[in-house]
Image: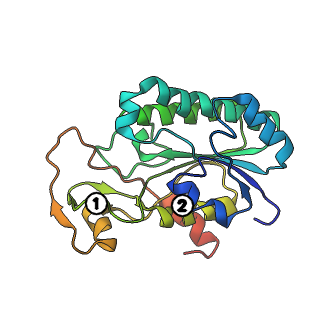
């Protein structure tokens, strides 16, 4: 990664905070560079000498996205469109953090080649963001992933909901590896499938198991990470 400097959006968030100090980067705050202001984006890019943009900024709270549909569409779709336009204009790569919610979460083991079918409005806006990038530029990497805070925030969790997510510090290291690999196209990043309960128990041995009986809740959200494991194995990182 020597000599490669990144412009990070959303660098103050949970994921950005676990990435920005470990790679050469500039992570402006929202008041310095609002992704809804294409002129502010361009001002940073044209002076920065960046190799790539790492786009983390999003309305990622599913309930907030559902409640504030216009806002989440503006940020997750139109903001991504502006970043893609500037990346194209200045011929720099765009890494986009997407989500497992681009799939319905009913079957699990979703591959990069599976057609998206978003689980909710948040998933729809992230899927639309993916399309904005694919329609604008060729030099991109869409990273579908999911992560939890450093500590499990609830006293109990589900034994029958399955995921490829992991804790934010774990996923951050995986994303940094992806940047090192200079991958293109779409990649699913995570760790092997486990239940929410199994994941929670890693850092909270006292977590209380329970079953999810909500039929509308996506219970098979796990992504197929075979392609990612292949890339890691190929480079001796597995």
**Comparing marks 1 and 2, which lies closer to the viewer?**
1
Q: Quadrant of residue 78?
A: top right
Q: Secondary structure at mark 1?
A: helix
Q: Residues within 10 Å of mark 1 (few under 14, many from 20)?
A: many
* Quarter of the rendering occupied by the C terminus: bottom right
Distance Cα–Cα, label 1 vs label 2: 21 Å
Which residue is pictured at 73% across the width and 46% down the height? 93
Q: Quadrant of residue 130?
A: top right
Q: Residues within 10 Å of mark 2 (few under 14, many from 20)?
A: some
Q: What residue is shown with label 1?
A: 196
Q: Is residue 21 above or below residue 136?
A: below
Q: Is residue 91 visible?
A: no
The reply, left or right, for residue 105 in relation to residue 7 is left
Residue at the limit of the structure toward the top, as seen here: 70
Q: Is residue 236 above or below residue 215?
A: below
Percent across and percent down for residue 195 are 28, 61
| Label drawn at residue 128 | none
Percent across and percent down for residue 229 are 52, 65
| Label drawn at residue 228 | 2
The reply, left or right, for residue 117 in relation to residue 82 is left
* Quarter of the rendering occupied by the N terminus: bottom right
The reply, left or right, for residue 4 in relation to residue 218 is right
In this view, the residue in front, 62 or 176, is 62
Instruction: Pick whichever of labels 1 and 2 is earlier in the sequence.
Output: 1
Q: Is residue 187 visible?
A: yes
Percent across and percent down for residue 161 are 25, 54
Which residue is pictured at 28% across the width and 60% down the height? 196
């Amino acid at each position: 990664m020597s000599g490669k400097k990144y412009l990070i959006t959303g660098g103050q968030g949970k994921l950005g905070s676990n990435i920005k100090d470990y790679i050469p980067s500039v992570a402006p705050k929202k008041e310095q560079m609002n992704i809804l202001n294409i002129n502010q984006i361009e001002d940073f890019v044209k002076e920065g000498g960046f190799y790539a943009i790492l786009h983390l900024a999003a309305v990622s709270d599913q309930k907030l996205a559902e409640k504030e549909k216009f806002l989440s569409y503006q940020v997750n779709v139109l903001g991504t469109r502006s970043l893609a336009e500037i990346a194209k204009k200045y011929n720099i790569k765009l890494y986009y953090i997407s989500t497992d919610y681009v799939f319905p979460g009913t079957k699990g083991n979703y591959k990069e080649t599976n057609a998206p079918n978003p689980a909710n409005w948040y998933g729809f806006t992230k899927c639309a963001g993916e399309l904005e990038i694919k329609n604008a530029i060729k030099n991109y990497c869409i990273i579908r992933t999911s992560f939890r805070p450093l500590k499990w925030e609830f006293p109990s969790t589900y034994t029958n909901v399955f995921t490829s997510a992991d804790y934010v510090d774990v996923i951050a290291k995986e994303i940094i590896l992806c940047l090192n690999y200079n991958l293109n196209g779409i990649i699913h990043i995570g760790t092997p499938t486990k239940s929410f309960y199994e994941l929670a128990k890693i850092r909270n041995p006292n977590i209380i198991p329970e079953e999810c009986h909500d039929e509308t809740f996506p219970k098979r959200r796990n992504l197929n990470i075979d392609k990612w494991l292949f890339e890691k194995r190929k480079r001796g990182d597995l």
